Image: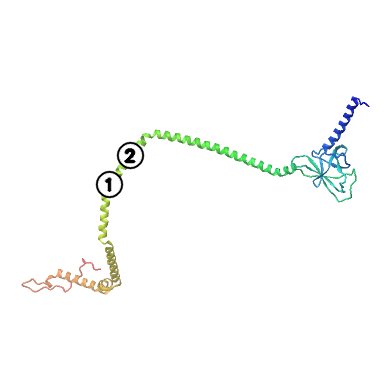
Amino acid sequence: MKISREAKVGVMAVVAIVMLYFGFHILKGSDVFSRTHQYYVVYDNIDGLTASNPVLLNGLNVGRVQEIKLLQSRKNQILVSIDIQKGVIIPGGTAATLADGGLLGGKVINLVVGTGPALKDGDTLVSRKEAGISAVLQEQALPLVNHADSLIKNLDVVVMGFKETGLILNQVLKNYNQTGTNLQRLLNENRTNLVALTSNLNKLSTSLVETEKELKPLLAKTGTLADSLNALRLGETVQNANRTIGELHTLLASVESGKGTAGKLIKDETLYNNIDRTVVSLNKLLTNLREHPKRYINISVFGKKDKGPSESPLDTTTVIK
């Protein structure tokens, strides 16, 4: 029996379509030759979960995401259908946790086995979500961002301070430049005076040198005088003078206390009174002798001796204290 060319083309086309279908599902990871159980999970947000993403149990791939539908009648929740290999018993209360698939990205569903009775095909699992790496990084990076923001603000303040400092330095440098200009002008205006001052200083220095030469002999003589004074033993002389002054003090103290002849002359009132009476009597005698000298000296050759009064009044010219 001869097969026509058209029939061969048709058979080859059917085979190609079958191979494409099975190849597509094999590439998706679906086991088209084994029976699976289908379960459902409802999420509020699937964060980029797509069909054919793996379903893991304790890190082992036990299924795939089969289909994802939008439930607009239930506030736009997401219905996810998952296929689990036969022989894998899913107890009641098992949670399907949506998590990140690792550093390479993507999403996976991790099964957290419950403790209830085994679920049947078509039952709904408990939905959960796990904080992804991006959320953790965002949570950890938020304080760093805040610190960086504070650091940037502080740097802005420091930069403003540097800017103000730069303005101040510019002003200071400008003042220094102006001061240097004024100083240069002052030096130019007083150059003649400075030259004269320098000349006067040179003359003064020369005069000081000459004065030093003249002072050296004088200083030498002063040293000789000091040696002479040392030779005079001024210490012994001063000691003897102090001793003499001490003896004089002792003598004056004795006189003051009435000891000795000088002390009695000063302190004894009886001696003073006797001397006072003697002076009075001597005054009377001298007065009588002056008034009546013949009583005491006879110069008459003839005649009787005129003796006069035996006592004359006190001479008032002599004051007796």
Nearer the viewer's eye, disc 2 or disc 1? Answer: 1
- Kindly identify the residue that appears in the image at 55 percent across and 37 percent down: 166
- Residue designated by label 1: 213
Which percent across, then down, holds residue 233? Answer: 26, 62
Q: Is residue 118 above or below residue 156?
A: below
- Kindly identify the residue that appears in the image at 84 percent across and 35 percent down: 23
Q: Amino acid at mark 2?
A: Asn
SS class of the residue under badge 1?
helix
Out of 276 and 295, give the one closest to the viewer.
276
Q: Amino acid at mark 1?
A: Lys
- Residue designated by label 2: 200
Label 2: few (<14), some (14–19) or many (≥20) C-alpha neighbours in 10 Å = few
Q: Is residue 113 above or below residue 256?
A: above
**Quadrant of the rendering where the N terminus is positioned:** top right
Q: CA distance from mark 2 to mark 1?
A: 20 Å
Is residue 232 shown left or right of residue 12? left
